[in-house]
């Protein structure tokens, strides 16, 4: 366990202790609610993990890296960004997935483009977002997010 993760765990336990000391009843009530929410999310999270595992079994990261390395950086970046826009994966799964791809040899720029569009652009969630914010806002937000994702990927390629 790295220092950052350890610090988060320690901070969480400290604040949980403070909350318990302040009001045991409310803290226990909130913990029960959180457990219920976790149980409700568990099937979705497990199915996403299963799907990613299946995809990585059928398309091993080394093969993905070999394919991407045969493409130009620009093409690989745009393709990575497009895959990210149509994929719906939570960030806590996306980061380890991208780390696996980078370790396998996929370039930083296409990996960052995939990651940023994965978390910033939502083709899958477009209908839901359209209902809440309207078509124009949703289209502009997704379009700008896609462009910024490409820009972020290029900047990260220079930095890293």
Image: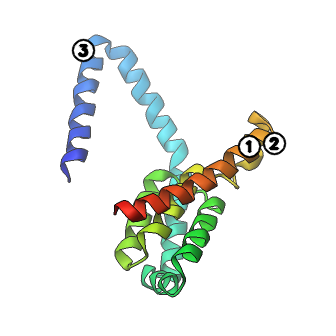
Dot 1 lies on which element?
A: helix
Q: Residue at x 56, y 60 (%)?
A: 150
Q: Answer with left or right where residue 94 lies relative to residue 1.
A: right
Residue 120 locus on image (x, y percent):
58, 50
Count of numbered tags: 3
Q: Residues within 10 Å of mark 2 (few under 14, many from 20)?
A: some
Residue 160 locus on image (x, y percent):
34, 63
Q: Residues within 10 Å of mark 3 (few under 14, many from 20)?
A: few
Residue 160 seen in this snapshot? yes
Q: Answer with left or right where residue 58 lies relative to residue 25.
A: right
Position above or below: 102 against 57: above
Position above or below: 99 against 56: above
Residue 75 locus on image (x, y percent):
59, 76
Label 1 vs label 3: CA separation? 44 Å
The colour mode here is: rainbow
Q: Answer with left or right where residue 132 lies relative to residue 105.
A: right
For the residues bearing labels 2 and 1, Cβ distance under 8 angstroms: yes
Q: Which residue is mark 2?
A: 135
For the residues bearing labels 1 and 3, Cβ distance under 8 angstroms: no
80 vs 123, nearest the viewer: 80
Q: Nearer the viewer, mark 1 or mark 3?
A: 1
Q: Which residue is mark 3?
A: 21
Disc with the residue nearer the chain's start (1 vs 3)? 3
Dot 3 lies on which element?
A: helix
Q: Residue at x 25, y 46 (%)?
A: 5
Q: Residue at x 80, y 41 (%)?
A: 136
Q: Which residue is mark 1?
A: 138
Position above or below: 68 against 158: below
Residue 118 seen in this snapshot? no
Label 2 vs label 3: CA separation? 48 Å
Disc with the residue nearer the chain's start (2 vs 3)? 3
């Amino acid at each position: 366990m790295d220092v950052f993760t350890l610090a988060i765990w320690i901070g969480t336990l400290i604040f949980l202790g403070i909350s318990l000391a302040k009001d045991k009843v409310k803290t226990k009530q909130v913990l029960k609610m959180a457990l219920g929410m976790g149980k409700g999310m568990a099937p979705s999270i497990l199915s996403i993990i299963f799907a990613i595992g299946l995809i990585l079994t059928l398309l091993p990261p080394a093969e993905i890296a070999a394919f991407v390395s045969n493409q130009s950086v620009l093409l690989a970046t745009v393709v990575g960004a497009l895959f990210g826009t149509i994929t719906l994966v939570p960030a806590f799964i996306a980061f380890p997935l991208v780390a696996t791809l980078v370790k396998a040899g996929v370039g930083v720029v296409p990996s960052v483009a995939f990651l940023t569009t994965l978390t910033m652009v939502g083709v899958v969630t477009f209908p839901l977002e359209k209902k809440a914010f309207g078509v124009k806002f949703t289209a502009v937000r997704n379009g700008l997010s896609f462009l910024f994702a490409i820009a972020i990927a290029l900047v990260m390629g220079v930095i890293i």
